Image: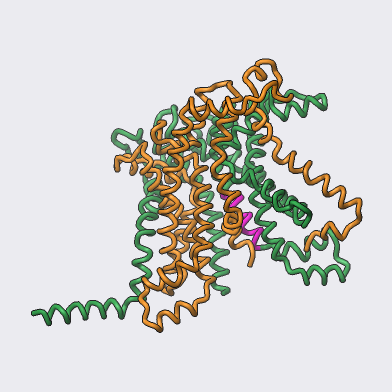
Chain colours: A orange, B green
Amino acid sequence: MFPTPIERQSAGAQVAYKTLLPIALLMWLGPLLAVALFSVKPEGDFANANYWGLPSSFEGFANYGQVFFNSDMPRYLLNSFLITVPTVIGAVVLSSMTGFALGIYKFRANLWIFFMFVAGNFVPFQILMVPVRDLTLELGLYNTKTGLVLFHIAFQTGFCTLFMRNFIRALPFELIEAARVEGVSEWRIFWYVVLPLMKPALAALAVLIFTFIWNDYFWAVVLTQGAESQPVTAGITSFNAQFRAAYHLMSAGSIVAALPPVAMFFLMQKHFIAGLTLGAVK
Amino acid sequence: MADAVLTQTAEKESWFHRNQQAIAPWLFLAPGILFFAVYVIAPVFQSFNLSLYEWDGLGQAEYVGLRNYEDLYWEFVDRDAFYTSLKNNVIWLLMYLLAIPAGLFIALFLNQTVFGIRLYKSLFFFPFVISQVVVGLVFTWFYDPTFGLLNAMLGFFGLGPLNVMGNEHLVTYGIILAGLWPQTAYCMILYLTGLNAVDPEQIEAGRLDGAKGLRMLWYIILPQLRPATFIAFVVTIIGSLRSFDLISIMTGGGPFGSSRVLAYYMFEVALSEYGFRMGYGAAIAVVLFLIMMCFITYFLWSMYREERGR
């Protein structure tokens, strides 16, 4: 293990390390903790310039209550879910098929199609912006959740295909050959042989895509406008305009908007990290 | 009659059966390729085409040849917008790369087995999970000249106040610092995973040969972390050129357009209150695309070599 494990070093080094660890963490998360502190303060503290002291009274319930019951925030959160969940399903379904095709079959265009997906996944959003917006307008889907979902599915298929294909490549190919010798049809090989083996990849992708789409801001601004379809990332700016200079509410709103992917991460940590670091180890 | 139908279906089945392995991949690929072609591949070409037109998004598009590019090159339309954005893009690209050594540093710091280290690792990774919009808000408040944590700390040392977001020389660096926060976390997790897989025998062998500290890191550890470093480079470069959310949230390109980058400038030209100059915006997008394409080609080339190597 590198660096040398701390338990093999002097007692002084061990104590130093164990005290440094929480201090480093506090500094690392400092800006975020500040916002968390703001979100439980009463309004008066900001008027009295009591920014960094203890809250003069704990107003967490009142502030978060305001966010949940007296603003459009629940609406935005619901929109975010209604955009994110279908996208996750769509992208995972499409890419498990494309990944299967590119991972299992040998045909001439294979590598080129794979590279098309990879390259498309890295393209700057701006070069897609105007045509995608026009297409969405023409389909009558501008300012709808469906319009956003369709685009997200298409774009995420690039990354997901890269992921799935590499995962399937690493599966034992003998399994598929054995099934073919038995005369199992290709579709049934996909469904009964490969798909069950892909469960970890499906879970990892689902968590990753959930986070990516939940956190998307650019396409939300380009393809939607009002509270009826905007996800929470775009909604938070309207929320902040509504509660301008009410820092306790804006802080609470930001924390609420950030929470679902955070919860997802802590619940599915293993899959999340496995997904993000695929390819980081040979 | 019934016989004929039967033989026909039998023949059909056998044709499909015989060619199953050639047809199946295309059937599996069809929906994915269709979506991707309509929403990603075609729009790239449409944007190239659109950049030769002047179009307000509603009326008739007028063919103007390369005039949009000339306007960009000479800055006929917006003074000090294109080159400021381009310069900022370069700053973003270079500064963002700091996430890689910073991520490695934190990964080395956390690669221990003391009590509770798993929780520490997750909490250090935390900023990556939060949306950039919230990161932007958090850092806007962090920099705030009246109540921000930064100025509270500067004030503690008798310095400040410093208005980072209002200073045209500092603003880009201020935003990049906000972006480095989640990006460093990402690089950290890549390296932590990589460090986990480092061969312990090589480390022991290195120790016997008297390799220590930095020499050990450079000659024995880093070569084994190469796959992690490659991915860190890819995601960091792409991330830096995609910077949009933070700028939009933290400054809106200001003050006086000094924190614009190409991605934000393009959006401003094509979709915000400036009026809908779609063709001009498409020209900016094409420039950004060509810059990115250099990196994408390099990444694909590396992947191609590796595929051949198998």
B232 inside magenta stretch: yes
Picture residue at 65% right of the left edge, 31% below the top = A35
Q: Specify the quadrant that holds the C terminus of chain B.
A: bottom right
Can see residue B152? yes
Question: In the depicted view, which residue is nearer to us: A83 or B177?
Answer: A83
Q: How many marks?
A: 0
Question: In the depicted view, which residue is nearer to us: A107 or B141?
Answer: B141
Residue most extreme to the bottom: A181
Can see residue B84? no
The quadrant in which residue A192 appears is bottom left
Is residue B100 left or right of A139 when viewed as pictured?
right
Return the x and y of residue A118 as percentages of the image width and height.
49, 58
Question: In the depicted view, which residue is nearer to us: A112 or A157?
Answer: A157
Q: Specify the quadrant that holds the N terminus of chain B.
A: bottom left
Picture residue at 56% right of the left edge, 29% below the top = A64
Return the x and y of residue A100 as percentages of the image width and height.
44, 67
Return the x and y of residue A117 as percentages of the image width and height.
45, 59
Relative vertical location of residue A161 with respect to residue A61 in this rendering, above or below = below
A3 inside magenta stretch: no
Residue most extreme to the top: A48
Question: In the depicted view, which residue is nearer to us: B176 or A278?
Answer: A278
Relative vertical location of residue B306 with respect to residue B184 in this rendering, above or below = below
Q: Main secondary structure of the magenta part?
A: helix
Is residue B190 left or right of A208 when viewed as pictured?
right
Which span of residues is magenta-colored? B227-238
Residue most extreme to the left: B1
Picture residue at 77% right of the left edge, 43% below the top = A24
